[in-house]
Image: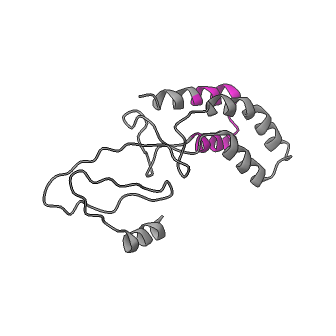
Amino acid sequence: MPEFIAYFGEHYVQLPLEKGDMVFFSPALFHGAGNNQSEIDRMANLVQISSAMGRTMETINTDVMTEAIYPALLARIEAGAISERQINNTVAAAADGYSFPTNLDSDPPIGGNAPKTGQKLLHEALSEKWSLARFTEAMAAYAERRQA
């Protein structure tokens, strides 16, 4: 969104780091403070560690939950028996809403800053009223792309 890009461009902060420095980011932080301004090429090692303020390292099989609720959720949408807010709440509770960890070689961020989430896939399937077979196939391909 142009307004987001403009805001980010006016408010980003670059942090000069030295060898051995460590930085802790909030999960709510938009990371990407512009081009590297140093005179030498640098690289970083990103280690994701679970914390009270971050995403847990444990995994829940949201793919199975999403496939289990899909037929009932679609039926309620088609019957007009569920509000937009209820749809969004159900999708948020059942489907994976975070793009990472993933395999960026097979699951690249097409058209955005991060790969498609399970939530986006579920919303797409519901809005286009996919069959359960098509949705299950799409979920299997989604899971396959995310494998390391």
Residue at 13% across, 55% down: 40
Residue at 59% across, 30% down: 139
- Image: 17 above or below 88: below
Residue 91 location, x and y as percent?
A: 69, 44
Report the front residue among 24 and 41: 24
Indicate yes or no whether the magenta region holds residue 51.
no
Residue 146 location, x and y as percent?
A: 47, 32
Residue 47 occupies which quadrant of the picture?
top left
Residue at the outermost bottom position: 10
Residue 2 location, x and y as percent?
A: 45, 68
- Image: 20 above or below 138: below
Residue 65 occupies which quadrant of the picture?
top right
Residue 77 location, x and y as percent?
A: 79, 44
Report the front residue among 4 and 16: 16
Indicate yes or no whether the magenta region holds residue 125.
yes
Q: Main secondary structure of the magenta part?
A: helix
Residue at 69% across, 44% down: 93
In the rendered structure, the answer to whether residue 122 lies left or right of residue 32 reads: right
Span highlighted in magenta in the image:
118-139
In the rendered structure, the answer to whether residue 132 lies left or right of residue 3 reads: right
In the rendered structure, the answer to whether residue 40 lies left or right of residue 29 reads: left
In the rendered structure, the answer to whether residue 121 lies left or right of residue 100 reads: right
Which image quarter holds the C terminus?
Answer: top left
Residue at 41% across, 40% down: 108
- Image: 9 above or below 120: below
Report the front residue among 38 and 97: 38
